Image: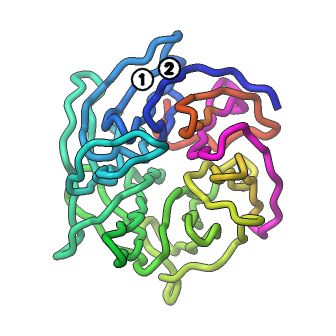
């Protein structure tokens, strides 16, 4: 497939959001910023510090960011110094950012990675975990309110939960597990509630070869498009059938849908620091609160 480069020179881009005005808001993990790409320009919206990772529009029009805390060298670029990971809220009218959550109960969040809102205005997010020497923090899946009033742990013990997304009927939340290259499904009984005995989720499918799964987006037909490090985009059905869309970068990290027919896809190729746009064979699922 052919594609158009919308921006380059980005410092490990991730978390793209196709905005109603035609711009794309994304994060630059190594730069520590929320950034807008528009008409060939790249503008910083907010300097958050740490490592802003996944991003989503909330019911109040603000952007909510899963901030992994930074402190790493990604794609050869040294990022911001290590900070406490958490969930940040950015007011797009003022560019002001504030921290909503950095712990769940008595436990500090480690490295929040991706985020998605449900119809009720709550959001799911993943915590990737963090490596420290020869030890590694485990990964979790969480549900929270955007007003800062509640955050709950729904699953803990994963091996690098990364991308997160909801099925079209919002009866399933998907999490992509990086190191195993697996897509995990968590069946829901209600918003923010996993079925009894379902904290570990169930396996949907596995990446071919040695690909690592990163962030994801869901198509209108329920198939899941997963940015696959080493393999471009892997599209997986709810039954595990998959197809591949190769791209010329080994660090493809995220994908989102936009355009009037939701068949424009915006993809972050973080190894080369680019945001690209291409046409997609299937329309994407319209995200809640996306305008």
In the picture provided, is 280 more to the left or to the right than 88?
right
Task: Specify the segment rendered in magenta.
Answer: 238-265
Residue at the spot x=76%, y=29% of the render? 279
Q: Is residue 212 magenta?
A: no
**Which quadrant would the N terminus be assigned to in this image?**
top right
**In the rendered image, the vertical position of residue 193 relative to residue 247, given as above or below:** below
Residue at the spot x=57%, y=44% of the render? 254
Q: Which residue is mark 2?
A: 23
Would you say the residues marked 1 and 2 are in contact, meaning their CB atoms lie under 8 Å apart? yes
- Residue 56 image point, x, y percent: 43, 42
Q: Is residue 260 magenta?
A: yes
Q: Earlier in the sequence, mark 1 or mark 2?
A: 2
Q: Which residue is mark 1?
A: 36
Residue 143: quarter of image: bottom left
Q: Residue furthest bottom?
A: 197
In the picture provided, is 53 more to the left or to the right than 271?
left
**In the rendered image, the vertical position of residue 195 relative to residue 249, given as above or below:** below
Residue 33: quarter of image: top left
Residue at the spot x=72%, y=32% of the render? 263
On the question of residue 280 being in view, the answer is: yes
Which disc, if any, is residue 12?
none
In the picture provided, is 106 more to the left or to the right than 160?
left
- Residue 3 image point, x, y percent: 73, 25
Foreground pick, 269 / 78? 78
Of circles 1 and 2, which is in front? 1
Residue at the spot x=77%, y=68% of the render? 240
Regarding mark 2 in the picture, which secondary structure is present there? loop
Foreground pick, 204 / 286? 204
Label 1: how many Cα within 10 Å (few below 14, some 14–19, many 20+): some
- Residue 275 image point, x, y percent: 57, 29
């Amino acid at each position: 497939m052919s594609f158009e480069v919308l921006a380059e020179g980005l410092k490990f881009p991730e978390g793209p959001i196709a905005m109603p005005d035609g711009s794309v808001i994304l994060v630059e993990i190594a730069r520590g910023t929320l950034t807008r790409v528009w008409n060939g320009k790249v503008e910083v919206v907010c300097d958050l510090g740490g490592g802003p990772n996944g991003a989503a529009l909330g019911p109040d029009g603000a952007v909510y960011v899963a901030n992994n805390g930074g402190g790493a060298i990604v794609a050869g670029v040294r990022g911001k110094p290590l900070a406490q990971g958490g969930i940040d809220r950015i007011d797009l009218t003022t560019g002001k950012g504030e921290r909503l959550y950095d712990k769940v109960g008595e436990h500090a969040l480690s490295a929040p990675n991706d985020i998605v809102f449900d119809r009720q205005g709550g959001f799911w997010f993943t915590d990737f975990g963090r490596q420290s020497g020869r030890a590694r923090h485990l990964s979790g899946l969480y549900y929270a309110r955007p007003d800062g009033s509640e955050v709950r742990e729904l699953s803990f013990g994963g091996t690098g939960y990364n991308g997160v997304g909801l099925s079209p009927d919002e009866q399933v939340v998907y999490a992509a597990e990086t190191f195993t290259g697996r897509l995990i499904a968590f069946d829901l009984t209600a918003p923010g509630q996993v079925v009894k005995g379902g904290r570990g989720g169930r396996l949907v499918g596995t990446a071919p070869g040695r690909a690592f799964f990163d962030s994801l987006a869901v198509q209108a037909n329920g198939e899941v498009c997963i940015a696959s490090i080493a393999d471009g985009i892997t599209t997986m059905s709810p039954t595990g059938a998959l197809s591949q869309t190769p791209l010329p970068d080994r660090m493809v990290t995220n994908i989102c849908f936009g355009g009037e027919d939701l068949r424009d896809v915006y993809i972050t190729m973080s190894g080369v620091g680019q945001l690209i746009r291409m046409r997609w064979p299937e329309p994407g699922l319209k995200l809640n609160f996306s305008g």
